[in-house]
Amino acid sequence: MKIGFYPGCSLTGSSREYNESLLAIAKGAGVELCEIEDWSCCGATAAHNLNKELSLSLPARNLALAELENMDELVVPCAACFNRLVMTQHELSEKEDLKKQVSDKLQMPLKNNIKIVNVLQFLEEHIVPRLDQLVKSPLTIDVACYYGCLLVRPQKVMKNERFEDPMLMDVIMQKLGANAIDWPFKTECCGAGFSVSKTEIVGELSGKIVRNATDRGAKAIVVACPMCHSNLDMRRPAINTYLNMKMDIPVIYITQAIALAMGLTPRQAGIQRHFVPVNLTVNR
Amino acid sequence: MNELIKKAVALLESDSVQVIIGYAEGTGTRTRAIFITRTADCENLIFDSRCVQNLAVYLTKSEIKKLGKPAIVAPIPVLRSILQLAVENQITENDLVVLGITPQSELVDFESFAAIEAFLSTHQIVIEEKYQETIREIKAMPVTERFAYWVKELEPCFKCYACRAACPLCYCTRCTVDNNQPQWISVASHPLGNLEWHIMRAMHLAGRCTDCEACYNACPMSIPIHLLTKNMLQDVTENFGTYGPSLDKLNTLSSFKPDDKESFIR
Amino acid sequence: MSKIGVFICHCGENINATVDCARVAKTAGELEGVEYSIDYKYMCSDPGQTLIKQAIKEKGLTGVVVGSCSPRMHEPTFRKACQEAGLNPFMCEMANLREHCSWVHDKNEATTQKAIDLVRTLVEKVKLNKPLYSIKVPVTKTALVIGGGIAGIQASLDIANAGHQVILVEKDPSIGGHMSQLSETFPTLDCSQCILTPRMVEVAQHPNIKLLTYAELEKLEGSIGNFKATIRKKAKSIDENLCNGCGTCTTKCPTKKIPSEFNTGLGTRTAIYVPFPQAVPNKPVIDKENCSYYQKGKCKVCEKVCPTGAIRFDQEDELVEIEVGAVVIATGFNIMQPSEFPEYGYGKYKDVITGLQFERLASASGPTLGEIRRPSDGKIPEKIVFVACAGSRDPAKGIPYCSKICCMYTAKHAMLYQHKVHHGKSYIFYMDIRAAGKNYEEFVRRAIVDDEVNYIRGRVSKIYEENGKLIVRGVDTLLNAKPVEIEADMVVLASAAIANPGAEELAQKMHVSYDSYHFFSEAHPKLKPVETNTAGIFLAGACQAPKDIPETVSQASGAASKAIILFSKDELSRDPLIAVVNRSPAPVFSTCVGCFMCASACPYQAIGEELITNRQGKVIKKVAKVNPGLCQGCGTCVAFCRSKSIDIQGYSNEQMCAEVVALLNND
Amino acid sequence: MTEFEPKIIAFVCNWCTYAGADLTGTSRIKYAQNVKIVRFPCTGRIDFMLLLKSFGEGADGIIVSGCHPNDCHYTSGNFHARRRWIMFRGLLDMLGIDVRRIQYSWVSAAEGAKWADIVNSTVNTIRELGPYTEYEKVAGYLEKEAKQ
């Protein structure tokens, strides 16, 4: 089985640590990820508001490339990329003529049958079964698992029965030895695309998330989306301004949490790249 | 098969049955069906690998019924047919004595039809790989070529109806092909009549056929009509689950599940 | 030799505009066996029908084909006309030249040619038609009513008052249904039990009603006028004739902590119990699942204390067979368990409850004696939030439909709360207010204006607990469309009304159809709202779709009147389009070989056995036999029969073959 | 040369598809003239022999249509029919009889537009497949016989 890998732009820029930690744990678990040769933009976040055909063609090109490389499964860690790729696949599978149109435009064959998985689904299938052996240093802390919006939606495509209260990340964190707290902000909006244009809105929305996690005793917020991460981490000054207090709770990617639990060094997990310092007590 | 002969003699002597339906030596190396009513003739009974004719076909024939209650020599294909005939209300447990024969040529008694079913559950119908291969090959042909193939295969058929006569499940008083109001099938043996006849025969065996191959063995022109029923058998398994005669299951085509799956209805 | 008459209708210009009717008539007249052919402006009009009648008489026609509209429209008209002229009505067939031809094609040669083909096809069919005669079926004048809620109670009383026998079957130990659980009813705020219990007593005392509680339908066979129902009377573990309902057993039973179904889990009951004080019949049953004796083999306290010795531990379920002529289904509805949406925290937070639970809190006979106290600590909530459409109108929850009753009962709940907790504050999150009904809108206005209930137009996204409060987060979509947060003490979810569990199974037992939400389907959404597709089975109340009490009661009376109409005659007349097993001369008798695959395929159990005997009485053959009272004429058996020994009148093998041949041979 | 006009026969049940086709008419939705309907009480009544007969009599295509699952007027005729079609279709396919020439569908009394769509798409399919010459050749023996 050949597992493909589509990093997308964030993982080569603002969320390099997400990329590094994912590849590190995959390597540690002996799972090979093959990056798509010559991958291109997925079209998020602007294309689907501007040009329908373009918004389908951009992701479809990457799907077609993955097919050409005979990939059986495609891991898409960025939640926004994942959402675009999955939506494209769903829409093209329902409309045969549209698929043909896109395929003609790309001048590439498109079977549109590759299995696309987000990072949580990938971990569940390939890493979780091996965790018993892999976990060297259990994370014995309370964590708040934060899913955001794009990982679980839209429901008709994701078929997630608990899309208002997802559990997958919680289950993985429990396996790492952590205690995933029960909290109501799992899928709350972080401010998303306002990250650049209206930071005060991000401050308010993300601020509520950060405060609630802290109030409920979490020692870290765990995420699986570059956008969530930058809003909760990089926009901490705006959050602190809104809350009128300094919040110290770190925000880590679930892949980083696994890397740390596997006994990889904080540097291998890319911890040093965060704005909010990460000081997790890890049982060695 | 001394044991078989002994058993036959005992059954006739005690008047438990009036006729033994079994196998005897035929012309040359072939075997034939024998209907024994006197103990003295019992020594003609044989059983070996050459005995492939499905004797169950005689159970519903009026000429044989007239002879009285039968005991029937029943290797596995015959047992399957007996069970299917029971499912279809053609025979009851009191109508006959079954002299079962295992694949190891051992004589086995059956107390009831249920016992036959239990025995057969360990001897499921399996379509041999060579037939599966042939069916795959035929299905791989382009559709027009496949049609031409069958028209050619069916061409030698001259409607002797040996296939019908040999099949234990073709026990109708009046076959549809003999019905002329309306004339469902043209009786002459031209390509259309042949095609329609074999389609109808196969459909009438859908979900009933026990894969004894009696039809093919009886065909004087060796037309591979058993491929049609074998293919249907595969279709039944694929679409509706396990296959084989069963006393408490309804027949495949006279039953249904609300969630039966198909992919072709719009 | 056939003498067929062909009558082509112009239907004004409806057919003639695209079909050359004159040419169709002319061409048909040249067909073999056609004696007379004519076209006319309106065949269904009086002169048109006279034309047919005269031709039958004057030309001695043996069959008639009318080329006009759909037979679903006018087949009865033309068959009646034939009958009046002395021709057997089943010798008349119709070619659908309007719906299937003139209205769906443009005017051209091919359209006229298609009309000719259709007429020729029916001419060939009618040549093979045989005179048929209606089947008379006697009617059993007893009705079976399934479900003892307000719908079943109303239907039973109406039928019984018309002088017919009724058997009312209720699955619970008491009749009363959901209505008996309600506090007060909108829009009048009269006490639900006060108006219901007299009806319950009337049912119990009515000489024409036989009440079977703690019983369920096991099987239903037969057809209109003559059903045979098997009822499972579940073991109550008491002798009802001896029990005087004194209630000693229920007070002494040591197993007391069972959540009460009647109180929606907010109260408890004992293992031997009467669901509620006003129950009818007011006699207990033992809940075997929770009884110490049945579970552990020890106890028998009830037996010791019973003054009449009525306890029967060895009682078993009993199956009774009854014969009825009509069935009224009144099995009601259920409410969706809101635990299906984790975002509202139902099940996780004790003070998030359903509307039905609120009814019990507000009911004077409820666990709090009518005081609004929250389940977690018994405190009176100062702030209460009602969430309308909890599940309803939400395709993501699988319920796209409106539950219809929630807008009204939520307004009522808020009103009752305000009446009982004067200083309290109540909020209702809603999508729309659907208050269509007599005095309904006024009622909602009263809640808003007089009782100062805060209506917030918007949905709730999430409910969570923080510092002992339930934080309800939603949106106010009016004015500034702002997110709102309310710190509530209690939340009431108006969870969706759904079909009863087991509705699907029940429908299959009775061969009635149901929709994708498992509500039973009416025969026609407008014109046959209380009939099902199975003749003789009628619908009442919320088993067909969510509805309120007045609507339920009207529908129940409607269903009852349908049963009464059915019982007004001694005999039913049925179309003879049924299956028949052939007979042939001895020694064959019938070509049927008795494999009985037709019997297992028959949806109506209409096929039985017939033994053919010789003069000495010896059985020579066993063949299939169709019971004309049960056969509905679907013809599934016919397509099954390998030897073509069973055929269906009106759609016989010969007729259908003739149609195929005629339709395809037009050159 | 005139364009090939497919000859298509439709076997439909009285309660759903026949009524649905009536609705197509009352809605005045136009469709091709090639399809002509034979009315049956139920899809359960539709004998596979009639489908066979249709090809023998020169049909280029066949439509078989009835009530959606769970909607059968007789509760289960369509379920029986569905099993029979599954088996029949498999057999025809094995024999090289082009299964694309038989369109099965569920059309309810409310689906007038769907009926028009089924008719038109079937006519298009058969038009693309062309006349069923392979079967006609086989059936042709009959006519020759009759002429002699």
Image: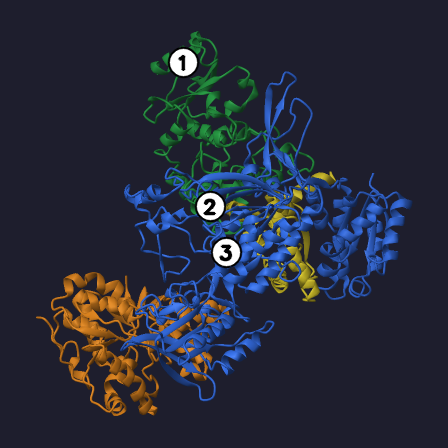
Residue sitting at the far left: A284
Q: Secondary structure at mark 3?
A: loop
Q: Secondary structure at mark 2?
A: helix
Pointer 2 local density, CA inside 10 Å: few below 14, some 14–19, many at least 20: many
Q: Amino acid at mark 1?
A: Ala
Residue C134 image offset from top left, x and y in percent = 73, 41
Q: Nearer the viewer, mark 3 or mark 1?
A: 3
Write down which chain is painted orange: A
Q: How is the image coloured?
A: by chain
Instruction: Name the residue that disc number 2 marks.
Output: B138
Q: Colour of chain D?
A: yellow
Looking at the image, residue D66 lies above or below residue C479: above
Residue sitting at the far right: C58
Q: Colour of chain C?
A: blue
Pointer 1 local density, CA inside 10 Å: few below 14, some 14–19, many at least 20: many
Instruction: Name the residue that disc number 1 marks.
Output: B8
Q: Toward which corner of the image does residue C130 lie, by quadrant?
A: top right
